[in-house]
């Protein structure tokens, strides 16, 4: 059975990629692990570092038809909070958010995401990197 997933659903689903999740199956089993990939048409997924019934597995393929619910097992990166901080320094029209990739683009040269800052070296890049690091450290303290 193929599912036609809306664009916004696909974007939300990507928030689970490479994250620790807790999955409940139709037979009541609870599986925890990190999602490495999700198949669009049936929501089957490959997980790493999984645990099911107190048994650990390096990799697990789970059929989407078996999933009842899935929750993030960690707090997602607050990309909008970071954007608010960056807008305090850079003009608001210089900081753009891209939903598809959950990234920010600053001055059309610097890509900022949960993973860090990419772009040409220099004073601006150094400032963005310091702001990113401070934001990450501040949010780690909140957890």
Image (spheres, rainbow, N blue to C red):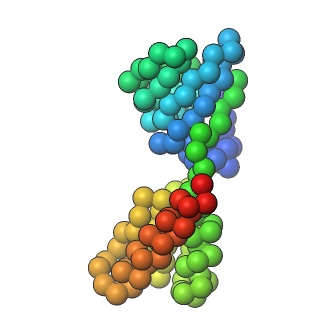
- Quadrant including the N terminus: top right
Residue lying at the far top of the rendered structure: 27
Q: Hey, which quadrant is residue 78 in on the image?
A: bottom right
Q: Is residue 124 left or right of residue 13?
A: left
Above or below — where is 125 with respect to 136? below
Residue lying at the far left of the rendered structure: 121
Residue 104 visible within the image:
no
Q: Is residue 54 left or right of residue 125?
A: right
Residue at coordinates 59% horizontally, 39% vertically from top-left?
A: 73
Total marks in image: 0
- Quadrant including the C terminus: bottom right
Residue at coordinates 54% horizontally, 87% vertically from top-left?
A: 89
Percent position (x, y) of residue 138?
54, 67
| Camera-side residue of 73 and 141 | 141
Percent position (x, y) of residue 84?
62, 76
| Camera-side residue of 140 and 18 | 140
Residue lying at the far front of the rendered structure: 141
Residue 120 visible within the image:
yes
Residue at coordinates 69% horizontally, 28% vertically from top-left?
A: 69
Residue at coordinates 65% horizontally, 32% vertically from top-left?
A: 70
| Camera-side residue of 73 and 124 | 73
Percent position (x, y) of residue 134?
48, 72
Above or below — where is 91 with respect to 14? below
Percent position (x, y) of residue 140?
53, 59
Q: Is residue 84 left or right of residue 61?
A: right
């Amino acid at each position: 059975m193929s599912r036609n997933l809306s664009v916004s659903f696909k974007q939300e689903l990507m928030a689970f990629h490479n994250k620790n999740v807790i999955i409940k199956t139709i037979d009541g089993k609870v599986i925890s692990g990190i999602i490495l990939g999700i198949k669009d048409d049936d929501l089957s997924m490959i997980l790493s570092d999984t645990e099911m019934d107190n048994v650990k597995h390096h990799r697990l393929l789970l059929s989407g038809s078996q999933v009842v619910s899935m929750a993030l097992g960690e707090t997602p990166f607050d990309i909008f909070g970071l954007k608010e901080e960056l807008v305090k320094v850079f003009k608001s029209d210089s900081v753009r958010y891209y939903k598809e990739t959950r990234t920010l683009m600053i001055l059309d040269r610097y890509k900022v995401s949960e993973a860090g800052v990419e772009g040409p070296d220099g004073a601006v890049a150094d400032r963005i990197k310091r702001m990113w690091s401070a934001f990450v450290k501040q949010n780690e303290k909140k957890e």
